Image (cartoon, rainbow, N blue to C red):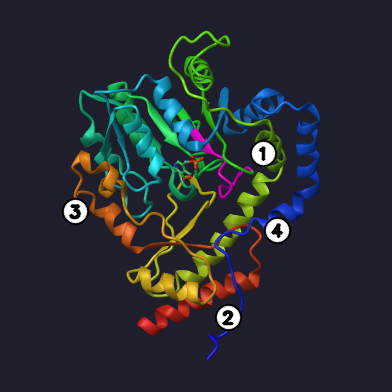
Amino acid sequence: MAPPQNAMTVKLLDLVPQYEGIRDEIREAIDEVLSTQQFILGKKVEALEAEIARYCGVRWAAGVASGSDAILLSLMGLGIGAGNEVITTPYTFFSTVSSITRLGATPVFADIDPRTYNIDPSYVSRRITDRTRAIIVVHLFGQTAAMDEISGAARRKGIPVIEDACQSIGALYKGKRAGSLGEAGCLSFFPSKNLGGYGDGGMIVTNDAELASSVRMLRVHGGRERYYHDVVGINSRLDSIQAAVLLVKMRHLEEWHAGRRANAAYYDRELSRIPGVTVPAIEPGNTSIYNQYVIRVKERDALKAFLQESGIGCEVYYPVPLHLQKCFAFLGGKEGDMPESEAAARETLAIPVYPELAAAQKEYVVSKIREFMERRA
Ligand SMILES: Cc1ncc(COP(=O)(O)O)c(C=O)c1O
């Protein structure tokens, strides 16, 4: 017998409708780059750096090859290396932590606040030692972490705070944008981000002129003058074509954020009425950009399977907290060390929230979640 036909399909993220709305602007911008045949860094990247610095409310920005490299280069710029400890969350994308270990430094994990999924400041304070040289906070899913508390603890000890804002460009914390709250902010232009390029890309934003200058040198093999190397850097530059695409997309970013927020508000209203479903908690003073809309349910795996069978895209961010990853076993992490991160990894599920979702698609998502939860009740 043929499988039942779904009423519709809803992808977790569909970038085609966005492209259809900006196709002409994009093609013109890419064509401009092609006519100059200038592909690496250059005027478009400089223009994007100025635009993003203004948008984030900082003085400097440096385009790099990815969000992962933005984190790595921030740590390199701050001189982090062997023997240093860096406090961070285990409930994040891999490269928040791999950037630390790549430099020979040691990640020290602090568990999350189970409501926001962001690092819990009370654990951060307890993990600070004489060897702590940086704290990396992650503004997960589009909402900033508790920056006042974390920055307060860090400032007392003279420890710089790096913001992994890869999922949170434009998010507001008490009126200030993500990336402007610590010593350095790291942005990703991976295509699925609210500001996504047509390939990899990233940026470091900062108010620290020395750090900006250091990162600019480190991203081009550690030299200020070509073929003269002061330090050992890496090759991590943003392409002109990506910058051209991102400059076009910047014109639409606020409207896209607003679309996601409207979708989130709809889900908040509808899903919070369903017993057993926890909707995202946004702290007072925070404005989320909802890079992901993440719900929490006990029977997450069964719900995920049911939604997928129903034609609804959904994903687990992240199934294995980083203290339990095989490649970090040498750090000695074990099950039970980070109970909140481990519980979140078992119970959370991201559902479609991209701005172009049609009303009928959102209604369908809600109806299927309701159907599942009612059957299980
Ligand atoms: C929290 C977080 N950190 C770091 C990264 C790395 O960014 P990229 O994929 O641009 O290297 C991402 C995105 O994938 C992310 O979501």
Which residue is depicted at the point 76% across and 43% down? 26
Q: Check contact, mark 2 vs mark 1: CB within 8 A.
A: no
> Which residue matches tag 2?
6
Decide if residue 134 is on the left or right side of residue 189: left
Q: Is residue 98 above or below residue 217?
A: below
User: What is the secondary structure assignment of the residue under circle 1?
Assistant: helix
In-image side of 139 versus 1 (left or right)? left
Q: Quadrant of residue 81?
A: top left
Q: Evaluate whether residue 342 shows in this view.
A: yes
Dividing the picture into quadrants, the one containing residue 9 is bottom right
Q: Nearer the viewer, mark 3 or mark 2?
A: 2
Amino acid under disc 4:
Pro
Measure how far apart labels 3 and 2 are at the Cα level. Answer: 40 Å
Which of the two labelled residues, at mark 3 and mark 2, occupies the earlier sequence position?
Answer: 2
Pinpoint residue 167: horizontal percent, then vertical percent. 50, 45
What range of the chain is rendered magenta? 186-197
Does mark 3's beta carbon lie closer than 8 Å to ligand 1?
Answer: no
Q: Residues within 10 Å of mark 3 (few under 14, many from 20)?
A: few
Q: Secondary structure at mark 2?
A: loop
Q: Amino acid at mark 1?
A: Leu
Three-letter code, disc 3: Gly
The residue to which callout 3 is attached is 336
Q: Is residue 163 left or right of residue 245?
A: left
Question: To which residue does mark 1 refer?
Answer: 246
Chain-order first, disc 1 or disc 3: 1
For marks 4 and 1, the one nearer the N-term is 4
Q: Which secondary structure lies at badge 3? A: loop
Q: How would you rate the neighbour count of disc 1 (Cα within 10 Å): few for under 14, some for 14-19, many for 20 or more?
A: many
How far across and how far down the image is residue 108, in percent?
25, 36
Say which quadrant the C terminus sits in: bottom left
Query: Measuring 57% from the left and 55% from the top, which residue is drawn there?
Result: 261
